[in-house]
Image (cartoon, rainbow, N blue to C red):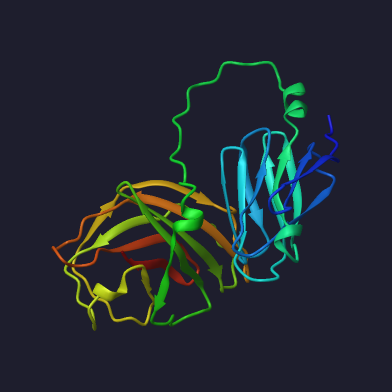
Amino acid sequence: MKRTLMLIAIATLTVFGQKIETQTPDRNRVTRLGTTQDHLSVIELGEPVTQVAAGSSSFKIEWRENKVFIQPLEPGATTNLFIWTASGRLSYELVPAGSVEQMHFAIDQDPATVQAKRPEPVEHTPVVEQTKIPPAMLMESSPVKVVGSSRNHEKVEILMQDVYQKDGRVYLRYAIVNGGRTVYFPAAPDVFTLNSLRAPQSLIPLANSQLAGAYQLKWKGEARVPVVHTELQAPVVRPGQTGHGVTTFDLPTASEPGLRTVVKLAFPADAAGNVSAILVL
């Protein structure tokens, strides 16, 4: 049965005047959501989110369970947003609100609609719960600096964007930029810690830095690091497009006391060769 979406209630926060809207789901309508830089907007649905895709990297977008968190990274940023659940796809247009008073604080889904259409319970095989990305990563993550430059832009490149550490784990958000001429199929990376490092300068001041291809880093030996969880924005990145992903892995110990830990993320190769990125923690 098709679902019909219409805005059925609008409430206003009494302190800042930000809007809270309640909606029923409909895949045939696009909902406008006003955002403001340095402020967080939330879409809360009546069922778990299975996948999210956006048309621009100008927004930080993450999801956990039935909630999607949206934060613009650039002033005046606009894009479209798709959210998938077990019931279908929802479409949104993210636009600048103009002021904090005009932004959408939250868009909630009418819980009665989902409950009324919920199918009869059936037995399922138990599923191991995946590690969730901490909500604090949205606001407390550190930006990754790029040191050096790439030697070849006509291939797939990994650009690390944010890193967050908590309880012995590293949460890394990155962009997958396809500068090549063929379709790229990303997957969860393998993570290795690099041993016996030799660098042209001290790595101590380079915490949270990505060492690009031209940076002359040498090492002897690699040790695999357990990867806990990976989320990818889309299974395919076409030429000229950019995808996004988040990978969680256990925090490795430094090879020697007082030195920075350096890890390599190895992704599936593209038509031009190996695809990897090096991060100083």
Q: Work out whether residue 141 can be spotted.
A: yes
Q: Position of residue 84 (x, y in %)?
A: 68, 43
- Residue under the image location 61 percent in, 38 percent down: 66
State the quadrant of the C terminus: bottom left
Residue 186 visible in this rendered orientation of the protein:
no
- On screen, residue 214 versus residue 87, left or right, reads left
Residue positioned 48% across, 23% down in the render: 126
Q: Is residue 222 left or right of residue 36?
A: left
Q: How many marks?
A: 0
- Give the percent coordinates (x, y) of residue 98: 75, 66
Image point 72% across, 52% down: which residue? 18
Looking at this view, name the residue that lies furthest to the left: 257
Judged left or right of residue 57, residue 12 is: right
For the view shown, which residue lies furthest in the front direction? 15
The residue that appears at 35% across and 67% down in the rendered structure is 279
Q: Is residue 13 above or below residue 274?
A: above
Relative to the observer, which residue lies in front, 247 or 224?
Answer: 247
Q: Of residues 30 and 17, which is closer to you in this image?
A: 17
Where does the image place residue 255, in percent across and percent down from the top left? 17, 61
| Residue 275 higher or lower than 230, as above or below | below
Return the residue nearer the eye: 164 or 253.
164
Residue 280 found in image quarter: bottom left
The percent coordinates of residue 135 (x first, y second) are: 49, 47
The quadrant of the image that shows the N terminus is: top right
